[in-house]
Structure formats: C-alpha cells, structure tokens
Image (cartoon, helix red, strand yellow):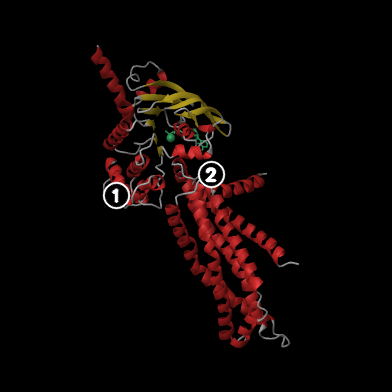
Amino acid sequence: MTYLHNIGAYFLMIVEMFRKPTKWSVMKKLIFKDIDDLIIGSLGIIAFISFFVGGVITIQTALNINNPLIPKYLVGFATKQSIILEFAPTFTSIIMAGKVGSFITSSIGTMRVTEQIDALEVMGINSLNYLVLPKTIALFLYPFAIAIGMFLGILGGMAACVFGGYTSLEDYVLGIQTDFEAFHIIYSFIKTFVFAFLLATIPSFHGYYMKGGALEVGKASTTSFVWTSVVIILINYILTDMMLGS
Amino acid sequence: MIEVKNLHKSFSGVEVLKGISTNFEKGKTNLIIGQSGSGKTVFLKCLLGLFNYEEGSIAYDGKIFSQLTEDEKRNLRAEIGMVFQGSALFDSMTIAENVMFPLQMFADQSKSEMEDRVDFVLKRVNLDNAHNKMPSEASGGMQKRVAIARAIVNNPKYLFCDEPNSGLDPKTAIVIDNLIQEITDEYQITTVINSHDMNSVMEIGEKIVFLKDGLKAWEGSNKTIFKTDNEVVTDFVYSSELMKKVRQMYIEEKQ
Ligand SMILES: Nc1ncnc2c1ncn2[C@@H]1O[C@H](COP(=O)(O)OP(=O)(O)OP(=O)(O)O)[C@@H](O)[C@H]1O
Ligand SMILES: [Mg+2]
C-alpha cells in the first residue's frame, strides 16, 4: 500500500515540478550550477572506472577464448559490445546512483530538515520546480558523460590488449569495426536518457519528502540509492526486451 | 487583517491546537505568547499553510486560505515575510544573496537597485559588514538578523516571526523589536510574532494572545496583561524574580 502511495506521489511530484516556473534568469544559474556539480564533477570517476573496466573486460574475454578456432578479433568485438550495450549505460548509472543520487538526496533532505524548503514555499516559490527541475535538466547532459565513458572503455581495452600482449592492435581495431550496428548506439543512448531522468528524480523524491532530522537524511540517502538502482535495473530489463528482443 | 476561526490541529491523534479563534490586525504587532511546547510554532505554520489542519478556517483580508487554488496561494505567499525559529537561511548562498533572494524571485528591479535595497535592510538589522559571509560562518544571532532582513526586504503585507529575538543579547533584541514595530507601523503590515520574551511583551505587545495547552487562555495587550487576574497569565508573566520585584514595586507605589 505504501509502495503504491509512493509511486503515486512520485508521479505527482513530476507533474508539480513543471508548475509555476521559476524566473528564467534564476533557473539558468541553477542549471549551470547543477551541471557543474552533477556532470562535470562526475567525469573523473566515470573516466577512471570506464578505462579500467574496459581493460578488465578485454583481459577476461581474451583469457576465455584460447580456442585457436576462434578468431582473435573477437576480443575487440566482445569488448565493444559489452561496453556500449551494458557497461557504460547501465553499470555506470548504478555507480552514479551512489554518487550523484546520494548527493541529491542529502542536499535536498538537509534543506527539508532545516526548513529551507518551507522558507521557499512561504515565499511563494514552487520548491519542486526550483530544486528538482534544474537537476533534471542538468542530467540531460549525462549521455555525454556516458559517451566519454564508452570511448575510454574501448580505449582501456585497447591498452590492455596491446600492453598485455593478448591480441595485436590490428585485431582489436578490426574487432571494434566488425558488425557495427548503429541501432545499438541508439538503444544505448535511449537507455541513458531514461536513466538520467531516474537519477535526477528518484533521489530528489527521497530527499524532498523525507521527515525527521540529520540522522534521517543519512537513511534517506541509503534508501534512495537502493531504489534508484532497483528501478534502473528493472527499466533496463524492460527497455532491452522491448528494443532488442524479438 | 488575519482572522482565525476554531483552528484544530493534531499530530498522529494527539491534538496540539484545540480550537483557537482570534484576529490579527493590520498595522499592529500581534504577539503569541506561551510556554515552550504550547503550540506557538504549530499555530504559525498552520497560518502559513505549511501544516494542514483538521478543522477551522484562516482568512487573509477576507480570502479564506484553504479555498484558494495553488497558484493563488503562491501569489498570496509572495506578500508574506517569515522568520523561522531556526532562521532557515539558504546555506549555499552568502548573507547578501540570501537577503536578495526574494527580490530576485519577485521584484522587477535592476541589479544595483536590489543591491541598494539589500544594503539598506542589512543596515537596519545592524549588519553592515557581513555581506559576503556564508550563513555557516555567522553566529546564531547574526543568522536571526539575516532572516529578519530577508523577511522584510520585499515589503511584505504580512510578517510572521517565530521568536525573532531568541538567542540575541538584550540590546540587539530591543533593536529588533523596535525595528519590527517601526516597519509594521510604517508599511501597515499585519505582523504576528511568537515570543516568550517578557521584554517584547512590554515593548511591542499591541495585541497579545496567550496560548496554553493548545487553547487560547487569554487575549489582551501590554496595557492589560499586568492588570489581569487570570492565573495562567500571571503565572507566566511573573515567573522570573525580576518581574516579581517589578510587580512588588508597582503595588507599593500604588499604596
Ligand atoms: N512535526 C511535528 N510532528 C509531531 N508533533 C509535533 C510536530 N511539531 C510540533 N509537534 C508537537 O506540538 C507541540 C507544540 O510544539 P510547538 O513547536 O508549536 O511549540 P512552541 O510553542 O513553538 O515551543 P517553543 O517555544 O519551544 O518553540 C509539541 O508538543 C510538539 O511535540
Ligand atoms: Mg516554537
């Protein structure tokens, strides 16, 4: 029952977010600040994780296909597929649910417990529009961060191949070019857009509607991480089935 | 004028406000006094619509708040200034930005006009040199004064202050009281102040509502509060040794 109630409240929040918009001059500043906090601030960790996980995927694949009948370029192909289809969009988003998500929940939650949200409301400001919309818009740039992650992941795989001596550079590059399907990229970015929206709104929901004090802010961040990850995984399954399944 | 009729509010079955009716007049400083936990903050938050209440009605100059649409409520609130008990400053903004915030959101002024206005109100609360400090770098009393500056910067029609001078030294407390009274009179604001400070009661209690256990136990002004026989009120008013002495002297003088 409370689940249903929360799902309803979540959708009402999204509708409310667009009512009585904040002045554009103010909103613009908020959006830029959130781009800085949420996107630019995450590039480092996304780059780091993508590069090294790309390397690991390559090594694992190379070690598992030691059958001489299987062509060497398959290592590059497998790395490319796993990074573009799953690793960059989905797993990076789970990590971002931890980083960006808990940041959003705790910053909005702190504003709730210190009555800053009440102060906004008393001034006649739509606090959902003021707090949540700029974060949602800022996260529209999230796919760019994921694109960088994809590129660095494939690059990391390449570095692992060449320096670890698993396959030659030519074979790896050939693998990347093999069976290139533009639709896979489209599928991947549609997922990323949906995840970006979830990454902005689910943690905001948990911060905005929390009750209690500083202790509860911490609890809300944890709950928010769990729910954001669960929903991302479920939506990932549904989207994949819809778009790639036959 | 704000009219409150038969206001009931409870939290998970426990009734905190048990039917309060009163009026707050325009151009007057209306005080709500009562012990800690008597429901002053809850009452104020009901007035502002931050809490839903089970029963009763609140009318702002004839407009019944609960009957307004969301947008009408927001437009009304743009004319309200509120000082929260815990200040509620935006901690990501400097003091000057906090004070400028309501202007940026609602006023059509140029940047320099807004800056002048911010300087002006900060001066009125005795804070000339704190523009660029963050709220976390300011003392509790300074934060209170910033909150007051933020509440009055946009010339509100209604001003609500939840213990505006708790945590301030006696001298600053009087400055703040006088400031609130001055602007209330000057701009004909409907001002409602929560307090348990006897100094404020004497200085600015043009109308006083005494709350006890969720009920209005007494209503009057600073002229009548020292003459009343209502035991609940005298208990509260003469709880300190100082006030007891003042009363003693007053009685002796009369004899
Ligand atoms: N959000 C809430 N949930 C549950 N109970 C609450 C809530 N807010 C206030 N109360 C209860 O309502 C009663 C009145 O609290 P209120 O904060 O109005 O007191 P107050 O008169 O403002 O006291 P003080 O002078 O200490 O600020 C208290 O018993 C408090 O426990
Ligand atoms: Mg209080």
**The numbered mark 1 sits on a residue in which chain?**
B
Return the x and y of residue B206 as percentages of the image width and height.
Answer: 34, 25
Residue B167 lies, in percent from the top left, at 34, 39
Mark 2 and ligand 1: say if the CB distance to the nearest ligand atom is below 8 Å: yes
Q: What residue type is labelled 2?
A: Lys
User: Few, some or many C-alpha atoms within 10 Å of disc 1 (few <14, some 14-19, many ≥20)?
Assistant: some
Q: Left or right: where does residue B4 sit relative to residue B199?
A: right
Amino acid residing under circle 1: Ala
Q: What label does residue A8 carry, if any?
A: none
Q: Do the residues labelled 1 and 2 touch (CB within 8 Å)?
A: no
Which residue: 34% across, 30% down? B188
Tell me if I can see residue B7 in this picture. yes
B36 vs B105, nearest the viewer: B105
Task: Identify the element where label 1 is drawn.
Answer: loop
Q: In this view, does A112 lie above or below B80?
A: below
Figure quadrant of the C terminus of chain B: top left
Image location of residue B155, percent across then percent down: 35, 38
The answer to whether residue B186 is left or right of residue A175 is left
Question: Where is mark 2, residue-wise?
Answer: A211
**Closer to us: B36 or A174:** A174
Asked whether residue B195 appears in the rendered view, the answer is: no
Quarter-of-image position of residue A225: bottom right
Residue that badge 1 annotates: B130
Find the residue positioned furthest to the right. Answer: A246
Question: In the rendered picture of this protein, how many numbered marks are placed on residues?
Answer: 2
* Front residue of this view, candidates B53 and B187: B187
Front: mark 1 or 2: 1
Image-based side of B69 in relation to A114, left or right: right
Q: Could you tell me which secondary element the residue under label 2 belongs to?
A: loop
